[in-house]
Image (tube, rainbow, N blue to C red):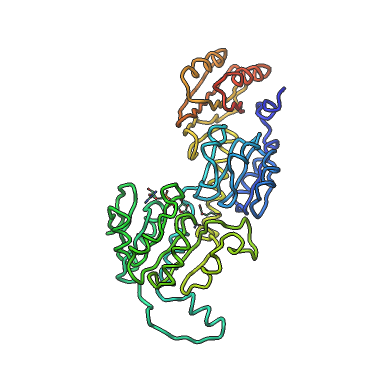
Amino acid sequence: MTGAFAKQLKPFATRDIKILLLENVNQTGRDILAKQGYQVDFLKSSLGEDELIEKIRDVHVIGIRSKTKLTAQVLREAKNLIVIGCFCIGTNQVDLNYAAQHGIAVFNSPFSNSRSVAELVIGEIISLARQLGDRSNEMHRGTWNKVSSKCWEIRGKTLGIIGYGHIGSQLSVLAEAMGMSVIYYDTVNLMALGIAKQVPTLEALLTGADFVTCHVPELPETMKMIGPEQFRLMKDGSYLINASRGSVVDIPALIDAMRSNKIAGAALDVYPAEPGGNGDYFLNDLNPWAEDLRSLKNIILTPHIGGSTEEAQSAIGIEVSEALVRYVNEGTTLGSVNMPEVNLRSLTVEEPNHVRVVYVHHNVPGVLRKVNEILGDHNVDKQTTDSRGEVAYLMADISNVNTHEIKDLYESLERLSSRIMTRVLY
Ligand SMILES: NC(=O)c1ccc[n+]([C@@H]2O[C@H](COP(=O)([O-])OP(=O)(O)OC[C@H]3O[C@@H](n4cnc5c(N)ncnc54)[C@H](O)[C@@H]3O)[C@@H](O)[C@H]2O)c1
Ligand SMILES: O=C(O)CC[C@@H](O)C(=O)O
């Protein structure tokens, strides 16, 4: 019996499934996974590449947040890995394509922390307009500095939202409720909430807004999308907020724009390089401009806490863990960010001599015929298949399979040249 077959053998024992959870995944998620009987290893922080490679070799499932980089180099070593859970929205830390090509599904939580980020940004808009960070710091140092110069109400001001997705649109509603006008720029034509207005270009947004806030994913097109030219276009005395990804804003350009008083304040929650865990080593070692950034007035620096609320983390823990359990136990890919979405109704009663076959394969002609020649020796009750780019995913429920036939079934599928990964469940 090959190692791979032993790993997938029907019915696999849930106690054999090894899970590594990094970055302090919430207790809700840990409980769901432990209740399945899986072996759950939990760490509060992320791991550097060498340690990660060492640990990932052994596990079937890994759960991460935004700091753990699952590059092709790391995933190459993850010989047993079948699924990755990103307990967050962003999936830019994972090589999604490499994972799909190797039959590793990736799940995330697409909107459970959107409200938390939107609320943080609302807090920052008011804090920047009233220079709250500076006043508070002065009081902590014993200085009473009662000023109104360049402190503003936000009522009647214009908020410019770049990226009108889950977070941007939620923020739009909150901002209007406080009397702000909202304009937004998005590459997709999107319905405005309330009386917000979509503008046709980034330039129109930058020239029209008093507060500019970024809510785009990390993509090649969004790298440094706010740089010297964009700061030049922004209104004199306007503000910039970035709680999306650190790569979106060119930080040295922001420092220049603030030093010249073009930009009156900024709030950053994300940075081009972030430490893997909590400690005293904030930005200095990682980012050469850190000292300059820290020396600026009216700048709020937070350690990537946009989604860090009890509500969001608890909801994310449940959502992602449940998706992992469905995938491990039933092969369901609904909600996966890198696999075709495939589902079959699960069995409501234990059926003897019944197996579920999951076959991830290269999306090339002739595969279904060959697979069905193998499955056709049994009774195929249900079958479904879908493809996404170069990867296809087939799921079949088969009856009349005797226990001694499972190994043959598995090995016949594994021998096909189209095979990426075979799993036999139940
Ligand atoms: N600070 C935090 O803790 C935190 C928490 C959650 C999410 N995030 C980040 O925020 C990002 C946005 O989250 P979301 O849930 O709103 O995502 P989303 O996918 O719902 O929305 C993103 C929007 O950006 C638009 N977009 C993409 N490229 C664009 C471009 N070049 N110009 C303009 N618009 C563009 C998309 O069309 C989409 O409408 C996430 O990708 C994640 O990186 C950060
Ligand atoms: O919790 C995190 O580490 C990431 C939060 C946020 O950036 C996300 O992508 O959801």
Nearest the viewer among 219 and 154 is: 219
Name which residue lies at 42% across and 51% down.
Answer: 222
Q: Position of residue 122 (x, y in %)?
A: 42, 66
Marks counted in the figure total 0
Above or below residue 95? Residue 135 is below
Q: Position of residue 342 (x, y in %)?
A: 48, 31
Q: Residue furthest right?
A: 1
Q: Report which quarter residue 224 is drawn in.
A: bottom left
Above or below residue 157? Residue 311 is above
Name which residue lies at 51% across and 68% down.
Answer: 293
Q: Report which quarter residue 119 is drawn in.
A: bottom left
Dividing the image into 4 quarters, which one contains the N terminus? top right
Nearest the viewer among 171 and 322 is: 171
Q: Position of residue 325 (x, y in %)?
A: 59, 39
Is 102 left, or right, of 173 in this rendering? Answer: right
Dividing the image into 4 quarters, which one contains the C terminus? top right
Above or below residue 211? Residue 59 is above
Q: Position of residue 262 (x, y in %)?
A: 37, 70
